[in-house]
Image (cartoon, grey):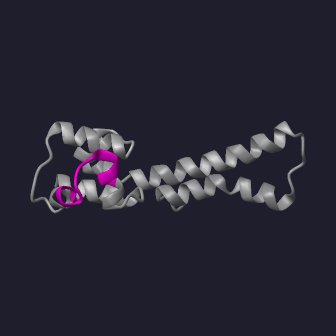
Amino acid sequence: MLGDNIKKIREELGFSIGDLSKKTGISDNIIKEYENNNKIPCSDTLNSISKAMDIKVSYIIRPELATRIGKLLEVENLLKNGLDEIILYAFNKEYISESKAAELMNIPLELFRILGNKK
């Protein structure tokens, strides 16, 4: 249900109910009502919640997208951090140590792990 999706996404993104309340102006109690499926948020409220969490409304509405958000954020962070390091070494024309090179070369394997591929 919609409330379950809001709660799952909020928790995956590391927001407390208080955080979401402050960002949206919706009281803690009303957010709890939504998350417990006791109330259904209107479209304006869904827009406000999605903007506060910096996601698309479709992630809240479509559960199959909501379950992937945590994995996508993990992949994004892994790629960003790895690319930042590679660019830093290249820009400074420094040599990468063997241990750092091995760590960076593990990024594709880590992506497979995050995305659920065992190969």
- Residue at 20% over, 59% down: 35
Determine the image quadrant of residue 50. top left
Name the dominant secondary structure of the magenta segment.
Answer: helix
Residue 109 appears left or right of 113 = right
Q: Please tell me which residue lies in front, 92 or 25.
A: 25
Question: Position of 88 compared to 84: left or right?
Answer: right
Residue drawn 38% across the image and 58% down it? 15
Q: Position of residue 81 (x, y in %)?
A: 65, 49
Q: Specify whether residue 47 is in view.
A: yes
Whether residue 21 appears in magenta in the rendering, the answer is yes
Residue 3 appears left or right of 117: left
Q: How many marks?
A: 0
Residue 67 lies in what quarter of the image?
bottom left
Is residue 59 among what the camera can see? no
Task: From the viewer's side, name the closer residue of 43 and 86.
Answer: 43
Say which residue appears at 27% left-offset and 59% top-offset: 7
Magenta range is 20-31
Magenta run includes residue 101 = no
Quarter holding the C terminus is: bottom right
Image quarter of the N terminus = bottom left
- On the image, the x and y values in percent for residue 29 come to 19, 61
Q: Position of residue 92 (x, y in %)?
A: 87, 40
Image coordinates of residue 34 in percent, x first then y, are 17, 56
Point 37% across, 47% down: residue: 53
